[in-house]
Image (spheres, rainbow, N blue to C red):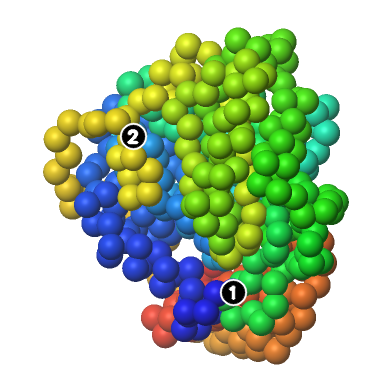
Amino acid sequence: MTRLFNDPAAFADEALEGFAAAHRRWVRPVTGGVVRAAATPAGQVAVVIGGGSGHYPAFSGLVGRGLAHGAAVGNVFASPSAQQIRSVARAAHGGAGVLLMYGNYAGDVLHFGQAAERLAADGVEARTYAVADDISSAAPDESAKRRGIAGDLPVFKAAAAAAEQGRSLDEVLRVAERAGARTRSFGIAFSGCTLPGSDHPLFTVPEARMAVGLGIHGEPGIGEEALPTADDAARLLVETLLKELPEDVAAPDGQRAAVVLNGLGSVKYEELFVVYRKVAELLGEAGVEIVDPEVGELVTSFDMAGVSLTLTWLDEGLEALWRAPADTPAYRKGALGTPEPEDDERAPAEDARDTAVPPASDASREAAGTVLAALDAVAGIVEAHVEELGRIDAVAGDGDHGIGMRRGSTAARSAAAEARERGAGAGTVLH
């Protein structure tokens, strides 16, 4: 249960503010998220990742040399807006284009795609890639519909390391596609997570049972089984993943794989090590050679009690990228040279034309009052029903709809009021 918060609607913003204050060596805040403390080297592709809050260290904790150049951060379990993504991408852009990377969720696909279109209009070349590694969320013949979970890390890592090598935008995208095609994940949970301000979890698991095949937004699993021992849990995770190999991997024997055993929020590190002991044994028996395994909290879901296992089947190129050094607040590997100096001369987070108030007629300014009244009514109705909106959403989704609508409607009302105070007409106020 999330106990320490102020206004639940402000939780994501305040968490990001505190994160940036605690990690100035690595990141600096910009509108919509964070970017590296030092500017992206000229001519280097910028890898910008992102998604909702509630998954730390994903996504802001993965910003730094050897990994992401920036992270766009949305509300709790909600995609960042296209404008937030665009703002972070423009601040991270080093002149060689931007690769936008995210988990395969409807809101993220929509907003990152819109951001890529806006960046193109700004003259910034952009590509997008959605990680889809969760084998429980769709059948192999519909793998493009799968969710992105802890497989985000090895796929982000591969693309970012390729960017550090100076590869072109299209080459970095091809690396992401290669890593994504060779990454599979599967998870189990023993209890659901609770959003800030809520007094109950998004889903519950009966005593002595576990949910199988869950997502990272509080989505319940696809089934239930008896609560296993640590060894039985490891066996379920390994055997499930070994049943589905990438098309160009004929058998696990003789293969090399990056392995990520991920804690979803409240499973202790000692428990993860007990499980990993058996994971390593079972993979070894199958003939898999483990390369630089990661055991810990890497993509979480607030206080969810659960674990997921990710396998990325490596070729020579992907292995070099997986082993490449990285230095971020939450993920470090190998050794990098002297840190780059911080650079305060960054690209503006917002274009001046996005906040300018053009001239308006008296009639338009009068009509702006009606626009503001409508937005005020929307915010009031959402506030009155925020808990019910969340409850309905939690039946089949992640339960964030109420808090997301409240955050959006109150922000819209506030922005509209500010624009009207500055003399904006109806169209500008509505925009």
Residue occupying image coordinates x 35% and y 67%? 17
Q: Which mark is on residue 274?
A: none
Would residue 131 appear left or right of 292 to someone viewing this image? right
Q: Name the one closer to the observer, 170 or 415.
A: 170
Q: Position of residue 331 (x, y in %)?
A: 38, 43
- How crowded pointer 2 is (Cα within 10 Å; few <14, some 14-19, many 20+) is rated as some
Q: Is residue 374 something one can see in this rendering?
A: no
Quadrant of res 418: bottom left
- How crowded pointer 1 is (Cα within 10 Å; few <14, some 14-19, many 20+) is rated as some
**Alpha carbon separation for disc pair 1 and 2:** 32 Å
Q: Position of residue 146 (x, y in %)?
A: 73, 39
**Residue hosting label 1:** 1
Q: Amino acid at mark 1?
A: Met
Q: Quadrant of the C terminus?
A: bottom right
Q: Secondary structure at mark 1?
A: loop
Q: Amino acid at mark 2?
A: Lys
Count the labels in the image. 2
Q: Name the one closer to the observer, 28 or 419.
A: 28
- As displayed, is residue 193 above or below residue 30? below
**Residue hosting label 2:** 333
Residue occupying image coordinates x 22% and y 44%? 38
Would residue 109 appear left or right of 157 to someone viewing this image? right
Q: Quadrant of the N terminus?
A: bottom right
Residue occupying image coordinates x 71% and y 36%? 235
Would residue 189 appear left or right of 63 to someone viewing this image? right
Q: Position of residue 179 (x, y in %)?
A: 56, 25
- As displayed, is residue 334 above or below residue 254? below
Going from N to C along the chain, the mark reached first, 1 or 2, is 1
Q: Position of residue 126 (x, y in %)?
A: 48, 34
Residue occupying image coordinates x 60% and y 10%? 254
- As displayed, is residue 358 above or below residue 57? below
